[in-house]
Image: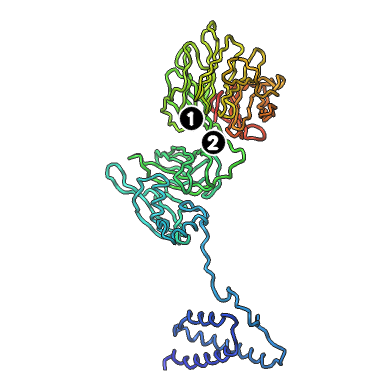
Amino acid sequence: MSPDDRYDDFDALLRSALQDEADTITPAGDGLSRIQQRVQQRGLRRRWMRPALALGSVAALAVIGIGAAVVVGNSGDDKVVLGDSSPTAEPSESATTTPIVAPNFPDQAVFPFTTATAEQGWEQDFANGGTTWESDPTQVATHWVQDFLDQPSVNRVVESRDDGNDKLVTLGRVLQAEGHQLFKVTTVRLTPYKNSWIVTGASDPNGFLSITSPDPGGTVITPVTVSGPAFGVDEAVKLDVRDATSATSYGSDSVSFGNGSPPWHGAVNFNRPSSPVGVLVAVDFSPADGGPSRIVAQQIRFSPAEANQPPPYFYAVKNDRVTQFASRTGQEIKYLTAQQPGGGLDDPQVYGNDVYYLQGAGTCANALMKVSTSADGSDNGDIVASPQDGYIISSYAVGDVGVSTFEVACDPARSPQARLIMTPTHGEQNLIEFKSLPPEIVGDPSYEQAGTSSTLDAFVRTGNEGYIARYVSPDKSATPDSRACAGLGPDAGLPQALESDANGDLWIALQTGSSMDVVRCGANGKPKLAFTVPGQDQPADVDVTRDGSAVLLTDDNGKVWRWDGSGNPQQLSTTVSLTHVSW
């Protein structure tokens, strides 16, 4: 008999005793089948465990013996009940099965899903023969970097390794210069969730480029300040705020550093996101061929849209070039137009995706121009309208229905001294002559309801006073009887600038002598004060968003204020004087 075989007889005795006890118990419901299933799943134990089991069995038999003695010692109705002895009661699920707990959805998910709900939708498609690349970490990483981060040259899988439950997929590219060597560009981290692999970030495989602020998964507003440790001698990093699951960039900027510089930082202004989750990407470029040499990325979350969130940019003229500015800070972002001989750019107005402006062309000559808001600084602009010889365009209005220009004669002896030309997109032009000045139009006129109406509102100075006139084709009067904002009296102040919004409200900047007041005048013609800037400044321009939620105001000294729909306006810290701004 071997040392292990000596326990076989004892095992048989133990099984017999347990069987006799079990025969006295009738499991309720499906309890018997569950017990049998659990016994089968356990299988046979290894022989080397039997001594320990035998010792445990002795203790179990002692407990059974005590229990049996208690039962025998109790008379008739004195029953010992262990648990629920009802014949209809079923054993609890927790006592018979171990639930399968699904892992939590990754908090810093970036791609291809940002929510468990979105992933579940793919799971259903996956089960019915849908796309499968989402289940392959290498394909997910490659697809994300090439197609969604817009880096198609990073097309080589250098290595893939495990990091706990995560996968680290390192991608690279071939240098398009002497040597054509393959080098690592980015290491993508992927976390498993059910049948999918989800990108949760990317790092520099060489450990140089990194982002220290904002934190991964942090909530940001525009402009977002991005920083990280400096390295190298002459680095140029592009910062990009992107949508997480579409190839959409909301805004980008570049930062240069190196040669022992302190930690780098840059500010990125971005457009209002269409989804709550995005990705912040930093790309360092190779001086050898200009392609990406390092890519890092992390999840960011966008602050919920404010009720009166202003547009991210406004436009003005700096250094005789149409320039884009950050609306929260007044910081210059980029030039839209190229430097023009003679300069003379003035009065920018945004309409749609274009910025309109006046450009001088020598003595007593200018033109109304436009340039796309996406221009890169090399554009010369396109001509929209030119004045008649001997006149210059002093102000204008742009809308869906057409363009109106107010032209003033260069020769004070010329007649008429000024002309208002209303040129509709469809229909006949309406020419209104101003025989002498005054009366004259001060500031830019504005189409009512943001250009959907052919009616034009303008402040007409008649001498020391004036009123807001309403010009309607084919009326030829320079001083029409029809008035906009009829409830605005002379005691309110002197209008200096105006603009309408899409709601049909007219916004008017007034000079009172002790403040600049901006009032909002609705269809009932009654003005209501929106905000006040104390002081003796004179308004130069006012510009309102299409929905009327935010306003820009400038004075004749070039200071700029932004009002976000409530409270006091904020003066922006612009580095140059800006008398005309638009968003």
Mark 1 belongs to which amino acid?
Asp
| Residue 552 seen in render | no
Q: Is residue 210 above or below residue 376?
A: below
Q: Is residue 242 above or below residue 418?
A: below
Image coordinates for residue 102, horizontal then vertical, percent: 52, 64
- The residue nearer to you, when weighing 300 against 259, is 300
Q: Secondary structure at mark 1?
A: strand
Q: Mark 2 highlights which residue?
A: 312
Rounded to the nearest whole Å, what is the CA distance between mark 1 and mark 2? 15 Å
From the viewer's perspective, is 217 left or right of 258? right
Q: Is residue 409 above or below residue 231?
A: above
CB under 8 Å between discs 1 and 2: no
Image coordinates for residue 140, horizontal then vertical, percent: 41, 54
- The residue nearer to you, when weighing 417 against 575, is 417
Q: Mark 1 highlights which residue?
A: 354
Marked residue nearer the N-terminal end (1 or 2): 2
Number of numbered discs: 2
